[in-house]
Image (spheres, rainbow, N blue to C red):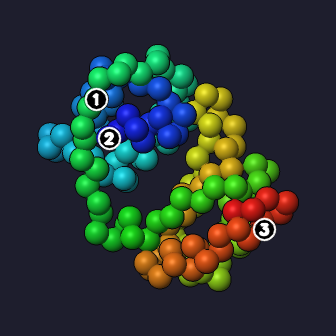
Amino acid sequence: ELRVLANAMGIKWSVKQTEDVIATIDQDGSATINFDEFFGWYFEQSTTATMSLASAAAAQLRLTLRKSDTADQRRVLVKGVPHKATEDSVRSFFADCGEISETRPLPWARDGTPSGRYVITFAEPGGVAGALKMHRKRLGRRFV
């Protein structure tokens, strides 16, 4: 469910707002969106507009998030990164896990400040296994 994902990211959407987002993102009219489509849209929105939206209604909206065969198997969500960490320091920290093709910081939607969360995409799926082994390792003063 897109609303569940949005809530986990600190965004409160009503059913209507969720439907509008799906209509905007869903290019092929299949009523499904994948990870890349959603986060591409999210990062575009978070840099051009505020994401403070009205509180979500209790109604449910089901949405299938298609799993990308390759990209999602190479991607990991990392929490606990120091807020002052740079993308270069995050890349260095995970360099032994495998070649990193992309790092994306996930800022707080309310004000765009660093949240300590990153989405890291590795060139090969084995990088994710290496990143998971980094669980509870220190990056600066924080545990990742």
Q: Which residue is mark 1?
A: 60
Give the side of residue 86 with respect to residue 50, left or right: right
User: Within 10 angstroms of label 3, few (less than 14), some, or many (20 or more) residues?
Assistant: some
Residue 53 rendering spot, x and y as whole percentages: 48, 20
* Quarter of the figure with residue 13: top left
Name the side, left or right, on which 99 lies relative to 86: left
Q: Residue at x 57, y 73 (%)?
A: 132
Instruction: Return the mark for residue 78.
Output: none
The residue tagged with tag 3: helix, strand or loop?
strand
Give the residue at x 35% y 21%: 58
Residue at left offset 51%, top offset 64%: 76
Badges 1 and 2: C-beta atoms under 8 Å apart? Answer: yes
Is disc 1 placed on a helix, strand or loop? Answer: loop
In space, the residues marked 2 and 3 are separated at their CA atoms by: 33 Å
In the rendered structure, find residue 138 and report the number of the disc placed on it: 3
Picture quadrant of residue 74: bottom left
Residue 97 visible to the viewer = yes
Query: In what element is the residue under mark 2?
Result: loop
**Residue 69 x %, y %:** 28, 69
Judge by depth and name the residue closer to the eye, 83 or 88: 83
- Location of mark 2 (residue): 1
Asked if disc 3 and disc 1 are in contact, CB closer than 8 Å, the reply is no
Q: CA distance from mark 3 to mark 1?
A: 39 Å
